[in-house]
Image (tube, rainbow, N blue to C red):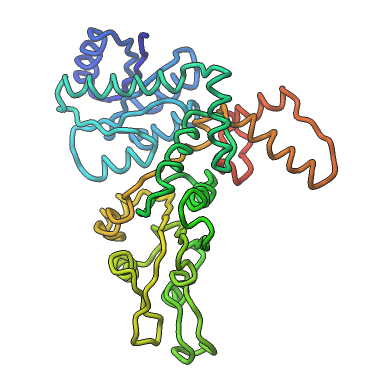
Amino acid sequence: MKHNILLVDDDFAFRKSMSSFLEEEGFYVKAVSSGDEAVAVVRQKLIPFSLALIDYHMPDLKGPDTIKKLKEYNSNLTVLGLSGDDSVNAHNDSLESGAVFFIEKDIGEAKLLSILHRACREVEKRTKPVSISSQSENQKLIESVGMVGVSESMAEVARLILKFGPANDTVLIRGEMGTGKEKVARAIHNASSRANKPFIPVNLASISSGVFESELFGHEKGSFTGAAKDRIGYFEAANGGTLFLDEIGELPKHLQASLLRVLQEKTIMPVGSNETKKVDFRLVAATNAPLENLIEKNLFREDLYFRLNVLPIHIKPLRERPEDIPILAHHFLKMANLEQGQDSILLESSVDELKKLNWPGNVDLPPINQAT
């Protein structure tokens, strides 16, 4: 399969040499000098690009902004960031904008080809038509862990749930808002030996800054104004079961050390107490924020990150698994019919329109009415 590559760089000499090299290796290359030009090419949809190489430093539309614009018109486009320097900002900005890899211009031909061929294999895997029998098998697997879908990416999430469930190690779930991170956490709990014990979900972004310690560790009566009685915290409430900490990147820096200590020692000390308590829980954490970027900004502890990222799971956004949209639509319509006592149906034309949407809110939020 011959792959089409969009090369975006304002350096004429680099564009010429890179285009010649890639074409000799069997790629078709469309080279342009600016982000605006790249957006115009992709918007026309005349060439089915597999990959795009986007330079970070450009005079008009910068690399990260170009990536975002291109993904608006083709959410399935695989983008690789490109730069003549290896600065942290160039790397992080490119990845946060939607690039799947960051390449330095002096990377070397052999390594560049290895990365490109690997990216092409991922494109082929993603665009390969899925047989009805494969979708049926995927659906059964996904339903077995209490979720809805038919895509290979969700089937892989289901496999990881069944694999990680019996373990006792910490799981870190990554995914955009609305992709179902709490559902995955519950499925992990249900697949574990702790299934008949508490599952305690906590959204750290919703906790006021002044009560973090009390909420997590509990407090004793009279330990502060308003503490009228003893109260157990989330760690103790999850004893024997699973504690799910959503938006882990929102945990204040001074409490990250406390969480690390709890994970290491399995003991807590309630606010106002001088005695520690033993706790036995399994931690599942989730984030929609790039923790690596928070580490670079000194907002998140690197040692805590490694302690959390023992068993990683990534949930793809809905726009990258459009084959899940019809079954999700029928699932939610069925639920609505049961609740309202109706018998509404979903037309195939409506399903086709749903598949054209960007779904920035993913499964949990309504889509913005904008075609990809």
The quadrant in which residue 26 appears is top left
Q: Residue at x 34, y 80 (%)?
A: 276
- Looking at the picture, does residue 350 appear above or below residue 203? above
Kindly identify the residue that appears in the image at 48 percent across and 26 percent down: 74
Tally of numbered tags: 0
Identify the image quadrant of residue 116: top left
Residue 287: % across, % down: 42, 52
Mark yes or no: residue 177 visible: no
Q: Return the residue nearer the eye: 359 or 342.
A: 342
Relative placement, left or right, of 275 versus 88 is right
Q: Please determine whether, in this image, residue 69 is positioned above or below residue 256.
A: above
Which quadrant holds the N terminus?
Answer: top left
249 w.r.t. 191: above or below:
below
Left or right position of 141 against 168: right
Q: Quadrant of the C terminus?
A: top right
Left or right: 96 in relation to 360: left
Residue 149, image x and y in percent?
57, 33
Q: Residue at x 33, y 10 (%)?
A: 28
Q: Position of residue 60 (x, y in %)?
A: 35, 33
Left or right: residue 153 compared with residue 267: right
- Taking depth in this image into account, of 109 and 230 the one nearest to the observer is 230
Residue 53 in sight here: yes
Q: In this picture, is 126 found above or below 160?
A: above
Instruction: Provide residue 91's location: percent of width, then percent of height.
Output: 26, 40
